[in-house]
Amino acid sequence: MDYLNIALKSIAVYAFIVAAIRLFGKKELAQLSVIDLVFILLISNAVQNAMVGDNTTLLGGLTAASGLFLTNFVLKKILFKHKGINKLIQGEPVMLIYKGKLRTKALNEVDISIPELEAAVRKQGVAQIDKVDLAVLEIDGSISVIAK
């Protein structure tokens, strides 16, 4: 029963982390800074005890990891088969620039500043926003840019 409890707590932590990442915005995934990396490491350390409790045995750790792998596998299958759930959890791409014009409402909705967008455009080899035909914030947090 102890190992079933570990697996169930691990699954609950997994669900919480997925929901928290979704709530705090997808741009965070592709644009990890040092601060974000430290945050992720601290979160993983903070939830470790919630998953395994006092059971620090190898079997306890493997049980937690197995629960996480199984949950991840099942969630990916569900997301692949059910587009509505996929959209709810992962979101949709957001158009940021269209035919050289900023879509400021979209930028505000996804919390991307103009300097951040300009940097992403330059990384794609385009010097100025007005030279962009289309820029999209993808569901993985990356920004795709198509030049005119």
Image (spheres, helix red, strand yellow):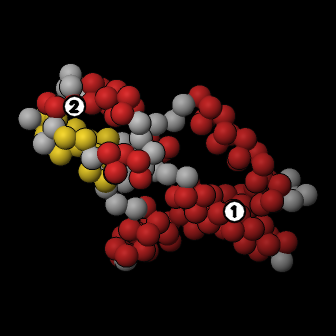
- Relative to 7, residue 127 above or below: above
In the image shown, does 66 or 86 lie closer to the viewer? 86
Q: Which residue is identified by label 2?
A: 129
Gap between marks 1 and 2 measured at Cα:
41 Å
> Which is nearer the N-term, disc 1 or disc 2?
1
- Relative to 80, residue 137 above or below: above
Residue type at numbered disc 1 = Val
Residue 53: x percent and y percent? 86, 59
Q: In which quarter of the image is the N terminus?
A: bottom right
Residue 69: x percent and y percent? 58, 61
Which residue is farthest top?
127
Image quarter for residue 135? top left
Residue 139: x percent and y percent? 37, 54
In the image shown, does 82 or 88 lie closer to the viewer? 88
* Residue beneath the point at 65% across and 63% down: 16
Q: Find residue 13 and name its label.
A: 1
Residue 29: x percent and y percent? 48, 44
Question: How packed is label 2: few (under 14 Cα within 10 Å), some, or many (20 or more)?
Answer: many
In the image shown, does 131 or 124 lie closer to the viewer? 131
